[in-house]
Structures are given as structure tokens and as C-alpha cells.
């Protein structure tokens, strides 16, 4: 284990010896509170063994039924499921503020050139950097929607494994017709490649519906369904994309996917912000899942997905960052806040699903949308031990009357003491326990400058500093 600061900043963390948590287990953990699927439970304990939750229940019962385990007491802490990022682009982490203040559909001007400038080393570092930020924000699972970098997908898999995060790894399946056989053969190999991998779960990805022929859309859907995997597609995200689909096919993007036979439980429709009532019904009737990306809507979108309506209609959906910022608490807050602004204010809905809706969608809801609901996303016996230890002793949460609401409205990544994935301690007080996080950041800074210099990135607006200077000149 790296030499890291063992002293907490608030008087609670220094009561916990992180060395007692570092190793394969088994562990008997006794926090103040455990966040169960049905809500917070005081006086509960969990047993972590073999990478899973071996037992969850009242602390006295768990201690009595596991007499060979010494309890590790975690005063002032909540044990809760790790967050699930249902939509990410791991190899875009070098871009960061290049996309800030830009209009929609920046993938052509920023992301494609930037990812195209990555080599194997820079793609690995970019993905690991994104995974590091995600872990710091409490995410234990990320869904990568496929990279356009000219590298083998295993480069991204290696980066996430080395970082210690669970990854739903997309492989881009784009074609213009003639490439369809080779694209589908590669898709089959990708789905088989990670069978049995404890942290990497293969997925297929089509950037947008027009990126593939109807035949390929249908075949990728079939391949994913047969493999118990997912297909990730950006759907109805921007006005320009909807218009292109209408001109080309006479159908809106989601309607076209339905026409091609691509809708179904295997599809994760990323964004789905511009939906007609009929399209909401299509999602519900076909069992299609959605990745709701509220921060992306605020930063570069044309609309906010009707997530409250989706919840009411029984549509599976999780929350995604779209690579914007890696903080699970702030993502849950943005999910509720966006619904309030877009829909709640107009209808007088002062609850907008309450805190539990968005906290649940940030965890188990995201796992279900990605096809991992039977594996992770909740603190429950038999599921993977992907969880957080959150300090609830400070001014933000200590006086809580409604912990789910407090976590959504007042939680942030600074409150996360520890992050566990597959039962292993991955981060302690924001730093990796098995590798050098600050060294990775330094390495990424140099590689990012070189990659951006090589890429033909085109921005529609100047930087904020240049914009300020122009404003002053006027």
C-alpha cells in the first residue's frame, strides 16, 4: 500500500486504520448506517468475502453468525453502494474545457479529432485518468461508449482494470455497408473476449443511428441480446441529429431504430432528450433502457430528458456523466435539479421524484440499465461488493432528517473516505491505494498537451479569458 495520509480531516477518519481494510478479506464492517435498497438502516453490518457481500443484516446477528471475523468499526460513516456512470467517454478526458461553452454536436469538431490524435500510450493514460476521477467521485462502474482512438479496445480495458474500476466497455460498430461483415465479426470477438472477466463487461456501441446500416443495427442488437450484453447508441440528443434522420430516413432517430429492429432490452439509448409521447411509449413497450445525462444537457444540450415520466412509465434508466465531471453526488443533484427546472416548475411539482428516485437511479438503476442489475448496484447479499464509505459526521450530513434527500442535495465527493470495487479497497481519502495517482496526473498533463497540439480541434467560441478581453474591448 502506498504511504498515504492516515489522518482524517474531521476527527472520524483518524479513528479508522485503513490497513484493516486493505486486502482480499473477508471483512466484517460495522458502520453507523448502511444504505439498503429500501433505505438507510442504522445498526447494520456487512460481510465482504470473495469480492461480494457475503452477508448483510443487523450487526448483532452478523457478528454472532460470523464469530471468526473481528469487526472493523467505522464510526461516523455510511456504507452505501458505489455510483454507476451509465454513459462515459473515457478517452476524451484530455479535452475537458475544450468543449465548455460550445454549441451542440461538438463531436465532429472536438472529440473525433482529439481521439484520433491518441496513440496507445495516450489512450491508456486518458482512460485511466478518467477512471481515477470517476473513483474519486464515488463511481465504481463506468460505461464507456466506445472510443474512436485507433487502438485496440483492450488498451481501455487495461486502463480501467489497473485503475480498479468496473467497466462496461463499448466497441464501436460503425459501417457504410461494405464493412458490415467485418464489423459484425469484430463485434462477436469483442463480446467473447471478456467472458468471465471480473471487472470488464463487453458492450457494443454505435455512435449515432446514422453511423450504421439498418442491417448492422439489427445484427448488433441480436448479438448483444444473445450475449446478455448491451448496445450503446446516442439517440435523439440534438436537434441537428433529429433533423438529419428525418431528411435521410423520414423517421426520427428512435423511430428509425425501431424500424431497423434495434430497440429492446439490450439497447441503452444515451441522452434521449428530444422525445415525443409516441417515442416514450416505444421505449416503454420495447423495454429499451436510457442513460439520462443531466449535466450534459445543461452544458451542451437542446433539452432535458423526461426522466420523471420515464420513471412513471417503468422505463429502465440510469444516470450518466457523458464525461462532464466525475462526482456521483453532484450528478444525482443535477438529475433532480434538471427535472425541477424543465418540468417541475411548470406543473407545481415540488418533489420531482424525491431524493430516493435520483439516488437509486445513480446506483442500482444504472446497473439495471447496463444489464448488471444482478451483479452490482446495491448493498445486498450475493452482489459484488462495490461500495463507498461516506463520512456523515460533518456539518453537511450529521443533522440529517432525510438521508437520501441529504445525500442528493448536500453530498459531494469530499465526503467519500473509501471506495471499494469487487471487495478491494481502491481509494482512501481520494488517493489510490495500489498505484500513484499524482504521478498519473502529471503524466497525463504532458501527453494531453501533445495530443491537443496534434489534433485539428475547432472551437466555435474563444476561451473564457479571450471572451472577457473581447467584452472589455467592446
Image (cartoon, rainbow, N blue to C red):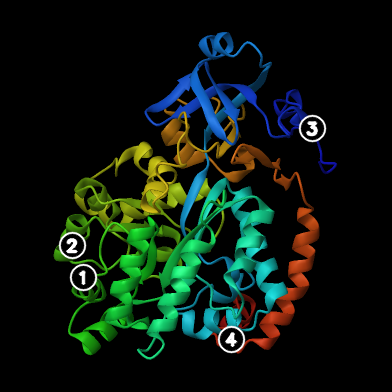
Reading the image, the residue beneath label 1 is 258
Q: Could you tell me which residue is drawn at 31 percent across and 75 percent down?
A: 217
Mark 2 vs mark 3, CA separation in Å: 53 Å
Mark 2 vs mark 1, CA separation in Å: 8 Å
Mark 3 vs mark 1, CA separation in Å: 55 Å
Q: Which mark is residue 457?
A: 4
Query: Of callouts 4 and 1, which one flags the residue occurring earlier in the amino acid sequence?
Result: 1
Q: Could you tell me which residue is drawn at 26 percent across and 83 percent down?
A: 245
Q: Secondary structure at mark 3?
A: loop
Label 1 Cα crowd, 10 Å radius (few <14 / some 14-19 / many 20+): some
Q: Which mark is residue 141?
A: none
Query: Of callouts 3 and 4, which one flags the residue occurring earlier in the amino acid sequence?
Result: 3
Residue 5 versus residue 61 in the image, above or below: below
Which numbered disc, 2 or 1, marks the residue closer to the eye? 1
Reading the image, the residue beneath label 2 is 282
Q: Position of residue 239 (x, y in %)?
A: 30, 78
Q: Secondary structure at mark 4?
A: loop
Q: Which mark is residue 7?
A: 3
CB atoms at circles 2 and 1 under 8 Å apart? yes
Residue 216 versus residue 279 in the image, above or below: below
Query: Of callouts 2 and 1, which one flags the residue occurring earlier in the amino acid sequence?
Result: 1
In the image, farthest residue toward the right: 3
Mark 4 vs mark 2, CA separation in Å: 37 Å
Could you tell whether 132 is left or right of 459 in the image?
Answer: right
Amino acid at each position: 500500500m502506498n504511504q498515504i495520509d492516515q489522518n482524517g480531516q474531521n476527527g472520524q477518519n483518524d479513528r479508522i486504520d485503513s490497513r484493516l481494510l486493505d486486502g482480499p478479506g473477508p471483512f466484517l464492517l460495522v458502520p453507523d448506517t448502511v444504505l439498503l435498497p429500501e433505505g438507510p438502516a442504522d445498526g447494520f453490518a456487512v460481510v465482504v468475502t470473495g469480492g461480494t457481500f457475503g452477508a448483510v443484516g443487523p450487526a448483532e446477528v452478523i457478528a454472532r453468525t460470523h464469530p471468526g471475523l473481528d469487526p472493523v468499526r467505522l464510526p461516523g460513516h455510511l456504507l452505501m453502494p458505489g455510483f454507476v456512470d451509465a454513459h462515459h467517454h473515457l478517452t476524451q478526458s484530455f479535452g475537458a474545457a475544450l468543449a465548455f461553452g460550445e454549441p451542440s454536436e461538438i463531436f465532429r469538431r472536438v472529440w473525433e479529432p482529439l481521439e484520433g490524435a491518441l496513440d496507445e500510450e495516450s489512450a491508456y493514460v486518458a482512460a485511466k485518468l478518467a477512471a481515477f476521477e470517476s473513483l474519486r467521485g464515488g463511481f465504481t462502474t463506468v460505461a464507456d461508449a466506445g472510443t474512436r482512438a485507433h487502438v485496440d479496445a483492450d488498451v481501455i480495458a487495461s486502463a480501467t482494470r489497473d485503475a480498479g474500476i468496473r467497466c462496461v466497455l463499448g466497441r464501436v460498430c460503425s459501417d457504410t455497408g461494405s464493412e458490415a461483415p467485418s464489423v459484425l465479426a469484430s463485434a462477436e470477438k469483442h463480446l467473447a473476449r471478456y467472458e468471465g472477466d471480473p471487472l470488464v463487461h463487453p458492450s457494443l456501441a454505435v455512435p449515432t443511428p446514422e453511423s450504421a446500416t439498418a442491417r448492422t443495427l439489427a445484427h448488433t442488437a441480436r448479438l448483444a441480446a444473445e450475449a446478455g450484453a448491451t448496445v450503446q447508441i446516442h439517440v435523439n440528443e440534438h436537434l441537428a441529429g433529429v433533423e438529419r434522420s428525418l431528411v435521410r430516413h423520414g423517421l426520427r432517430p428512435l423511430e428509425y431504430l425501431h424500424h431497423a429492429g434495434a430497440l429492446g432490452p439490450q439497447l441503452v439509448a444515451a441522452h434521449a432528450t428530444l422525445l415525443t409521447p409516441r417515442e416514450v411509449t416505444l421505449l416503454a413497450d420495447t423495454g429499451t433502457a436510457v442513460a439520462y445525462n443531466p449535466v450534459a444537457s445543461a452544458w451542451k444540450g437542446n433539452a432535458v430528458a423526461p426522466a420523471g415520466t420515464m420513471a412513471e412509465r417503468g422505463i429502465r434508466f440510469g444516470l450518466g456523466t457523458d464525461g462532464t465531471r466525475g462526482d456521483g453526488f453532484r450528478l444525482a443533484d443535477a438529475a433532480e435539479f434538471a427535472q425541477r427546472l424543465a418540468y417541475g416548475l411548470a406543473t407545481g411539482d415540488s418533489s420531482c421524484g424525491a431524493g430516493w428516485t435520483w439516488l437509486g437511479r445513480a446506483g442500482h438503476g444504472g446497473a439495471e440499465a447496463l444489464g448488471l442489475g444482478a451483479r452490482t448496484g446495491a448493498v445486498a447479499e450475493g452482489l459484488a461488493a462495490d461500495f463507498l464509505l461516506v463520512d456523515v459526521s460533518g456539518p453537511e450530513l450529521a443533522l440529517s432528517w432525510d438521508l437520501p434527500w441529504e445525500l442528493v442535495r448536500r453530498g459531494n465527493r469530499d465526503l467519500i473516505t473509501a471506495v471499494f470495487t469487487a471487495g478491494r479497497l481502491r481509494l482512501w481519502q481520494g488517493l489510490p491505494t495500489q498505484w500513484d495517482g499524482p504521478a498519473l496526473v502529471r503524466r497525463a498533463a504532458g501527453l494531453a498537451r501533445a495530443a491537443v497540439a496534434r489534433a485539428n480541434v475547432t472551437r466555435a467560441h474563444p476561451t473564457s479569458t479571450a471572451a472577457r478581453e473581447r467584452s472589455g474591448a467592446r
